[in-house]
């Protein structure tokens, strides 16, 4: 298995893309820390699925926009598994907001979770990655394919892509690789909750995808496995867009 005996933290892994990545890591032999902010039931379900399939996983609550929670997340990981090899910065806020309705609170909340949190997590990860490792920042195709209503989200994800490039150069000497995985429109619980599935929004996005379908979390997870594994050992500072050609 590609990730045998590696230890991974996946933030925001109780559902959606994060859950898909956590499950794929577990199937590939990694010991997975399933981070969640509030939905313990869903996080426990992800852990149970990994364990039932022969893997190893624990769920850890932490709001990764808060440094105290971040420190606790990584301390529990160290206490439980003794090391860290992989960090997936997946936790994020996605709001569809018309420009004129954006508030300062919206800006601050998105920046805190989508941009500041990955930096805080990366700082803690470096301390545990004594033998090198892989940091994967989850961005979005909206940074290169602008869409109305996504200004705040796209702004923070574009910033995160710059974080990737900068950290790749800063951490290369420690044998820590940093890459961006940029999904296109993906069918997740969050997409349904925000009304993005089953209506005009989905139809308009589907029309722009050459491969002719909406992504599933496993489509994104397979690429995350590659970036986490030794197969991508000469890949750092890169952005891989997984969007069906859109």
Image: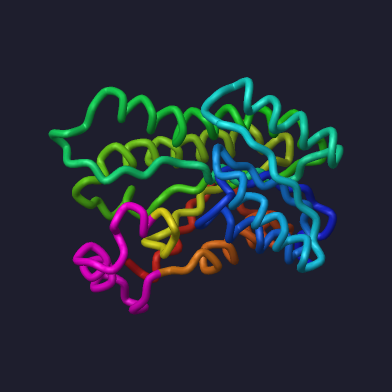
Quarter of the image for residue 105 reads top left
Quarter of the image for residue 214 reads bottom left
Provide the residue span drawn in magenta: 191-214
In front here: 91 or 139? 91
Quarter of the image for residue 193 reads bottom left
Query: Residue 179 location, x and y as percent?
Result: 56, 48
Q: Is residue 119 above or below residue 180?
A: above
Residue at horizontal 66%, vertical 47%?
34
Locate residue 108 relative to residue 37 in the image: left or right. Answer: left
Residue at horizontal 69%, vertical 59%?
25
Residue at horizontal 31%, vertical 28%?
107
Locate residue 144 relative to residue 139 in the image: left or right. Answer: left
Q: Is residue 161 above or below residue 208?
A: above
In front here: 3 or 14? 14
Residue at horizontal 55%, vertical 67%?
218
Q: Is residue 143 above or below residue 79?
A: below
């Amino acid at each position: 298995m590609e990730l045998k005996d590696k230890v991974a933290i996946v933030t925001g892994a109780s559902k959606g893309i994060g859950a898909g990545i956590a499950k794929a890591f577990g199937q590939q032999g990694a010991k997975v820390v399933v981070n969640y902010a509030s939905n313990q039931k869903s996080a426990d379900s992800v852990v149970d699925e990994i364990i039932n399939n022969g893997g190893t996983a624990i769920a850890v609550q932490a709001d990764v926009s808060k440094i105290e929670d971040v420190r606790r997340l990584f301390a529990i990981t160290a206490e439980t598994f003794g090391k860290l090899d992989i960090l997936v910065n997946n936790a994020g806020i996605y709001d569809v907001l018309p420009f004129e309705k954006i508030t300062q609170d919206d800006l601050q909340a998105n920046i805190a979770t989508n941009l500041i949190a990955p930096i805080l997590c990366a700082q803690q990860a470096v301390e545990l990655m004594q033998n090198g490792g892989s940091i994967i920042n989850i961005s979005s195709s909206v940074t290169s394919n602008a869409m109305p209503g996504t200004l705040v989200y796209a702004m923070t994800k574009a910033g995160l892509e710059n974080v990737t490039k900068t950290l790749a150069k800063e951490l290369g000497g420690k044998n820590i690789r940093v890459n961006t995985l940029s999904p296109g429109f993906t069918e997740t619980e969050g997409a349904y909750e925000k009304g993005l599935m089953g209506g005009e929004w989905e139809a308009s996005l589907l029309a722009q995808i050459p491969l002719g379908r909406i992504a599933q979390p496993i489509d994104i997870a397979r690429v995350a496995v590659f970036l986490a594994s030794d197969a991508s050992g000469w890949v750092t500072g890169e952005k891989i867009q997984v969007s069906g050609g859109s």
